[in-house]
C-alpha cells in the first residue's frame, strides 16, 4: 500500500464527562478530509491514546473511518504487550482501518533483540499492515536503522513514523529499507528538509487546525514547485510549529483546533488544559495563519 503525503495525528475530542465526543470527532474528520490531507492517524500520541480505554479507542477509529470518505486511516494501536496490541489491531481492522501504527513499547527498558521479537510476534497474526512508530523521547528507545531494515524485510511491516527529530537518522532509514517501505517524518519542523531528502510524507499535529496548508505544502513539493512549498512552510506552518513548541503539545494542539473553529474540548486526565495566559499567547501567534484560511 502507498503511505504518503500530509498525515494528520488527530486530536481526540472530549465531552465534559470525560468521554469521546463522537459528533465533534466526526466533524473534525470531515474538516481534515475537506482540507485535502492524505492520511488520518487517530489514537496516536496527539490523540492521547494512553488516556483512552479500549472501548474509547475503538469508538474513535470507527468514527474516523465512517467520516474518512476514502482517505486512508492508520489506526494507532500502541500498547506495552504483544497481546494488547493484537487486540487493538483486531478492533481497528473490524472498524475498517487501512493500517495500524504500533509505537515501540514504553515503561520497561528494551533492546534491539526484544523489539525485534515484539514486532515480529505482532506481525505473525495481524489483519492489517503495520507502520512502526518511533518516538524515543517518550518511550526511551530508538529503532536503529539496522533493526528497521530487518523488520522491513517482513512484507506485513510497511513503513515507519520517525519522531526522533534527527534528520540524518531519518535519511538512513530510507537507505536501509526497500523502496516500497514508507518513511514518514514525525517532526514537523523537519518536514520540508526531509521531503528534500526523499521521505514519503510527514505527520503533523498542526494540520488539525489548517489541514489545507499542510496538504498544499506536500503537493507543491511533489509537483516540483519548491518555492511555493517553502513559502507555505515558512509563512504558515513554521509559525504554528513555533507556537506549539513553547507549550504543552497535546493541550496546545487541542486548543489550536478550537481556535480554528472545531471545539474539541479539554485534554483527558492526566493532562491539564492550557492556562488563560497560554491560550492568549497561542491565539496571538497563530491568528494570522488561521484567519487567512478560506
Image (cartoon, helix red, strand yellow):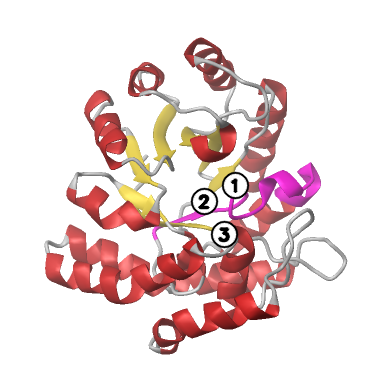
Separation of residues labelled 3 and 1 (CA atoms): 29 Å
Lateral position of residue 250 relative to residue 204, left or right: right
Measure how far apart labels 2 and 3 are at the Cα level: 22 Å
Label 2 or label 3, whichever comes before in sequence order: 2
Q: Residue at x 20, y 44 (%)?
A: 198
Of all residues, the one furthest to the right in this rendering is 17
Label 1 sits on residue: 96
Going from N to C along the chain, the mark reached first, 3 or 1, is 1
Q: Locate residue 262: give its quadrant.
A: bottom right
Residue 15, image x, y percentages: 80, 69
Q: Is residue 87 above or below residue 281?
A: above
Label 3 residue SS: helix
Q: What is the x, y in percent for residue 227?
A: 13, 70
- Label 2 sits on residue: 73
Nearest to the observer: residue 143 or residue 56? 143
Mark closest to the chain's N terminus, 2 or 1:
2
Residue depicted at 76% across the width and 58% down the height = 268
Tag 2 near tag 1, CB within 8 Å: yes
**Is the residue under label 3 in contact with that under label 2 (CB below 8 Å)?**
no
**Quadrant (top left, top right, bottom left, bottom right) of the N terminus:** top left
Q: Is residue 112 magenta?
A: no
Q: Report whether 265 appears left or right of 135.
A: right
Using the image, tell me which numbered label, if any, was put on residue 238: none
- Which residue is label 3 attached to? 249
Between residue 15 and residue 280, name the one nearer to us: 280
Residue 54 within the magenta-colored segment of the rendering: yes
Count residues near mark 2 (Cα–Cα under 10 Å), then give few for <14, some for 14-19, many for 20+: many
Residue 178 lies in quadrant: top left
Is residue 260 in view? no
Amino acid at each position: 500500500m502507498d503511505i504518503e503525503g500530509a498525515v494528520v495525528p488527530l486530536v481526540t475530542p472530549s465531552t465534559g464527562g470525560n468521554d469521546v465526543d463522537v459528533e465533534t470527532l466526526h466533524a473534525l474528520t470531515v474538516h481534515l478530509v475537506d482540507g485535502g490531507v492524505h492520511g488520518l492517524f487517530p489514537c496516536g500520541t496527539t490523540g492521547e491514546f494512553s488516556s483512552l480505554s479500549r472501548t474509547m479507542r475503538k469508538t474513535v477509529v470507527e468514527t474516523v473511518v465512517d467520516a474518512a470518505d476514502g482517505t486512508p486511516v492508520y489506526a494507532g494501536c500502541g500498547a506495552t504487550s504483544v497481546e494488547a496490541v493484537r487486540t487493538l489491531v483486531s478492533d481497528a481492522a473490524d472498524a475498517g482501518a487501512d493500517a495500524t501504527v504500533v509505537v515501540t513499547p514504553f515503561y520497561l527498558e528494551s533492546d534491539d533483540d526484544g523489539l525485534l521479537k515484539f514486532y515480529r510476534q505482532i506481525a505473525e497474526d495481524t489483519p492489517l499492515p503495520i507502520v512502526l512508530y518511533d518516538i524515543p523521547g517518550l518511550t526511551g528507545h530508538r529503532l536503529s536503522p539496522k533493526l528497521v531494515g530487518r523488520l522491513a524485510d517482513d512484507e506485513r511491516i510497511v513503513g515507519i513514523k520517525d519522531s526522533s527529530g534527527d534528520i540524518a537518522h531519518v535519511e538512513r532509514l530510507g537507505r536501509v529499507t526497500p523502496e516500497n517501505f514508507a518513511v514518514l517524518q514525525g517532526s514537523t519542523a523537519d518536514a520540508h528538509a526531509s521531503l528534500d531528502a526523499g521521505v514519503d510524507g510527514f505527520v503533523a499535529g498542526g494540520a488539525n487546525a489548517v489541514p489545507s496548508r499542510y496538504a498544499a505544502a506536500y503537493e507543491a513539493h511533489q509537483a516540483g514547485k519548491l518555492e511555493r512549498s517553502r513559502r507555505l512552510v515558512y509563512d504558515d506552518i513554521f509559525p504554528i510549529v513555533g507556537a506549539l513548541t513553547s507549550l504543552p503539545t497535546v493541550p496546545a494542539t487541542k486548543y489550536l483546533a478550537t481556535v480554528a473553529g472545531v471545539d474539541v474540548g479539554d485534554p483527558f486526565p492526566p493532562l491539564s488544559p492550557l492556562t488563560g495566559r497560554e491560550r492568549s499567547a497561542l491565539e496571538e501567534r497563530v491568528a494570522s495563519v488561521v484567519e487567512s484560511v478560506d
